[in-house]
Amino acid sequence: MNQQANPRSSWIVYAFLIAVIACGAAAGIYLSGLWPTRAASDAQIQVGPATHTHRFPLSERDAKDTVEAPELAVDAAGHVYLTWASKTGAAERTIFFTRSLDGGRTFETPRAVGNGGVFRSGGKGTREGHERRAMPRIALAGQQVHVTWSQADADGSRIRLMLTTSSDGGATFAEARPVSKADVANPTFTALALGARGEIGCAWLGSLGSQKVFAAVRPAKSTDFEADRLIHAGQDSKGVCPCCAVAACFAEDGTLYVGFRNLTDGYRDIAVGVLKPGKNEVEGPFPVTPPTWKFDGCPHDGPSLAVIGDTLHVVWMDARTGAQRCYHASAKRAEMKFSTANELRAIPAGTQGNAKLHVEGAGRLHAVWEESSIAPPADAKHQHGAPTLGKGGRAIYHAVLGPDGRFEKAKAVAPSDGAFQSRPCVGIAPDGRINIAWNELTEAGKAVVVRIQERETSR
């Protein structure tokens, strides 16, 4: 005869099994280190910021190059746009572009938006003189993505500053057009700036006998640039420091500031020229420091500018103390008298360089730069060859300007022992994500690296 199961005994068995499972799960969580502490139980559990890192390999011909640099920009939707140049042939440079439409989690396959030959200044054809780089720049205005670069003719006889624009957020680009109307401008070491009213400003060094500083502005709603403007011809019209990239930025009123490394009596210090809207005469140049750094050579390391309200900020590198260090100074735009320079980060040894600024939407000023942890040999001389890999390497640092006018404690972004990280740039998304790109050379080769760090969240 079949007996019916006792409902009460069945309930006891089920309860016992549930208790065993719950205890096992709790023990597993505790041993994993994820069990909340008492302090956390009374508040939300903090979740650390997630990071995404992407690498875009460069060619073997790029390994020895220490001048080309990636550039990125971030739009109001948090989309990330990235461009860089690569030497894709013995006499060919290609401009690549990619974008991320998911906040930096993934990037599209890079595509070419420009291609040209190789120009050498001071010589003819492709075998003499100093090889000039493409140095692409990027700027955003709503759905418009502007990209500029220096593009040599196929035979290397001249180089022109080109501009291409996408009106659909980087999906497609229009045919590139030259910025300068002068056929012999040979613009290199360029800068790109976008004004609040839609103005586009380009600045460059033009090799007309010697490297002089020029700029051109395309007014808002115009399709053509105005005539080239000479910003500074150098002492006795002999030019400025010939191989340091210039910098440019607009103020809200449309004033264009152009920063460059001047050359006066052997001193290679930073100066700024000012081009006001509707004015024919260029003001300045205004020295950022008194005569400070006397140097027989070009460091390939220009300034970076940013405007916040009525203040112009400048960062740069010089070796006034004997070691290369990055500095910051600022000036009221109405006066153009700069404050005493402060180091971005004081270090006991090693070198710094290639500092770049970015103004966050909220008005916070960010800086990135490269830094080595080991001092160079005492007999080290100025050179243009490939960096030497070894112990310590070179890393990218990031800091934010504090309310006291000094940059707060800097943090290494993604240090890697033995890697040579250089030429950083930074952009901040509306939600606070920090987007930083740089070149990185390791034993495995060279690549453009992009690191996106999301803001801290809670749950």
Image (spheres, grey):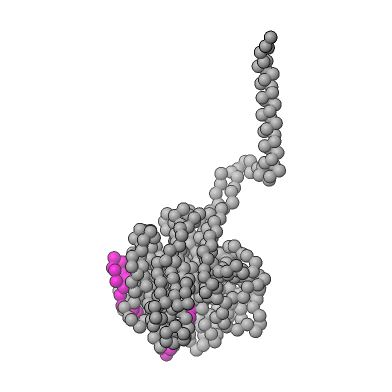
Quarter occupied by the N terminus: top right
Residue at the image point whose x is 52% and y is 85% from the top: 267
**444 left or right of 259 in image:** right
Quarter occupied by the C terminus: top right
- Up-down: is 17 above or below 107? above
Q: Nearer the viewer, residue 9 or 40?
A: 9
The total of numbered circles placed on residues is 0
Residue 458 visible (yes or no): yes
Q: Position of residue 130 (x, y in %)?
A: 48, 83
Magenta-tinted stretch? 218-245
Q: Position of residue 147 (x, y in %)?
A: 39, 67
- Up-down: is 152 above or below 12? below
Residue at the image point whose x is 51% and y is 64% from the top: 56
- Up-down: is 259 above or below 237? above
Q: Nearer the viewer, residue 383 or 315?
A: 383
**What residue occupies the far top of the structure in this picture?**
1
- Up-down: is 415 above or below 430? below
**What residue occupies the far bottom of the structure in this picture?**
236
Based on the picture, tell me whether residue 244 belongs to the magenta stretch: yes
**242 left or right of 278 in image:** right
Residue at the image point whose x is 44% and y is 75% from the top: 92
Quarter holding residue 20: top right
Residue at the image point whose x is 67% and y is 33% from the top: 22
Based on the picture, tell me whether residue 242 belongs to the magenta stretch: yes
Q: Position of residue 371 (x, y in %)?
A: 59, 71
Q: Position of residue 242 (x, y in %)?
A: 47, 83
- Which secondary structure type mostly characterizes the magenta part of the structure? loop
Residue 438 visible (yes or no): no
**178 left or right of 414 in image:** left
